[in-house]
Structure formats: C-alpha cells, structure tokens
Amino acid sequence: MKITRREFIQVGAAVAGAAALKVEPALGGQGGNPMSPAINASNFFGWIGNAPLAELTGFGYRGLELYPRDLEDRDLWKADVEKAGFGLLFMNAMPELRPYLTGSLSDAVERNRRATLDRLLRVLEQTRRLQISLLVVAPGRPAENYQTPAEARALLVASLRELADGGDTTILLEAAPWRMFASSKEIAAVVDEVEKPNVAAALDLGHALLNGESPSEASKTLGARLRYVQVHDADISPGSARLDRHLPLGEGSLKREEVREMMRDLPFAVGITPLADPLSAAKAALEWLGSAAAT
C-alpha cells in the first residue's frame, strides 16, 4: 500500500546561511550553503519534472529535497534540474518508515525491520553517489502487544548504528506525532545511546507543537545534537483537532519571532501544504520567515 502524493505533500526548504536566503541577520547560521534554500518539488507538484523550476529559483530556492522514490525518475528530470541551477541538498526517508505499512526501524517482526534497513541502506548508497550528506529518518512504534517500549528502543538503536556504519552520511532522527520517542528528550536520549558521530537529531516544529513542546524548549533539549530544523505550522488552539496537517506558516500556532530566534544558528527546512496555489504558498513561506529573496 502506497501513500498518495496528495496525502504526503510537503515543501522542504533548507537554509544554512543568511547570505544564501538573503534574510535579516537574525536568521541563518554561519558559512552559508549554495544549495539553500531548497524545496521538495516532487511532492509539491506531482513529480520534479512538472515543477516550474524557473519560478522557484526566482523566489530564491536553490536546492531540492528528495524522497527515495524520486531517484527512480532521476534520468527524466536531471537535465532540467541542472539547467535551473538546483542542487540536491538532503534526502527525507520519512515515507519509507510508516509503521504497519512499510515497516519501521524498531519493527518487532525481524524480517520487516530487515527489509526496512535494506531499503534505507540502498538509499544511502545513492545519497553518497549524489553527494547528499543528510538523511532524515523517524522512529516507529511498538507493534501492538508484541513489543515493549524497551524492546522497541533496543531495536531502534541497533538499526541506527547499522545505518551509521553504512557510510559518512549524517542520519538525523526526527520525532513524529503518535509514535514512540516523540519528545525531544526521548530523541536526545536515543541519539546519545547510539553514540555515533554521524547520528544526530532533526526537529520538526509542527510535530513539536503536537507533542506539547514549544520550539525553543525542544531546541534547548536537543542542544548540540540538533543539526537540522523543519518548519511547518500546526494548530493547537483550544478546541482544535490535533492533526498533523502541515499547515502553511502563519495559519497555526507557531510564533514567528520564536521560530526565528531558536533557529538563529541552525540550518532549517520550511514545510507547507499548498492549497489551490502552490507557487504562492512557496513564496509566502519565505516571506513569513523574512526572506528578501521572496519579496
């Protein structure tokens, strides 16, 4: 069973420096990155080849976030992407880690966990060839009553160590709502237990809100483990349904100044769910964060 593209629409924009995004000095980090900000053109427009790349570069996007399935069509979009001046920034393997559908890194059924690991190890081989240095993954959850939290954690740690030994790609563990290890404290503890230099943490701010954490609290808890931030909004106002809808920035409970402050020195990604006009949504995401490139 495959999740549909409509069900998993996400724009990713990775920003590693104020010079790259042309934001105000309060945002950015040091050093810059010629491939940032980036965008997930495949889930944004159906597949990368359908994306209006010229318009996106005009807004200021310079890199692409990929999902593993994008690599199957690489020969079809490679030339257009290079012509537009896009680079390949990072790989998001979250769609490969849907408990009860495709397995997880802590699956109680060993053949399922092994199949998940083998898929991700193949992805790691491709990321090395494409010189993509970041791979985002997520923990699973106990397989109903077949697994204790301690057993799930032990399997997650073992899986992350094996992925880390698969090359020098940095493996970023990201919490997701309604799974195990959903708090920043739990993510930090797992990263520490793995004890590999290329295993660290990613923070999704919408997920943090849904888990009852503020962006600044989560960032402080993760500390130096935090290497990458994903930004999309979530509505946690009284009476609202707790849904991971990846709301456009400004339509949920995120506070703009808090987001800008906690990401002062971090590379980050912007995730939005476009509605009728995805191009306007892509532009508005940078504007919400104060990007001069989008004005």
Image (tube, helix red, strand yellow):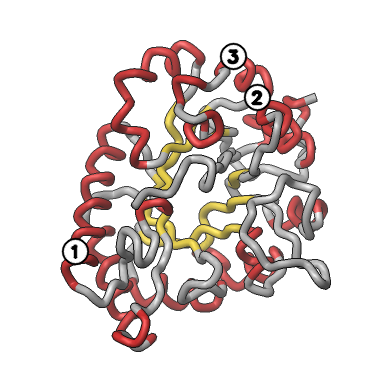
- Left or right of 96, for residue 220: right
Instruction: Locate residue 141: give its quadrant.
Output: bottom left
* 225 lies above or below 287: below
Under mark 1, the amino acid is: Arg
Q: Give the number of the disc on residue 1.
A: none
User: Is 287 in front, or is 104?
Assistant: 104
- The single residue placed furthest to the front in the displayed view is 1
Residue 258 image position (x, y, % from top left) = 78, 58
Q: How far is mark 2 from mark 3, CA to CA?
A: 10 Å
Q: Nearer the viewer, mark 1 or mark 2?
A: 1
**Residue 114: mark:** 1
Which three-letter amino acid code belongs to the residue tagged 3?
Ala
Residue at x 60% of width, y 27% of height: 61
Residue at x 74%, y 54% (from the top left corner): 259
Q: Residue at x 35, y 57 (%)?
A: 198
In terms of sequence position, does the residue under pointer 3 or pointer 1 come before the other?
3
Label 3: element kind: helix
Q: Nearer the viewer, mark 2 or mark 3?
A: 3
Query: Dot 3: within a 10 Å radius of its alpha carbon, few (fewer than 14), some, or many (20 or more) residues?
Result: some
Q: Could you say which disc has been placed on residue 60 in the image?
A: 2
Q: Amino acid at mark 2?
A: Gly
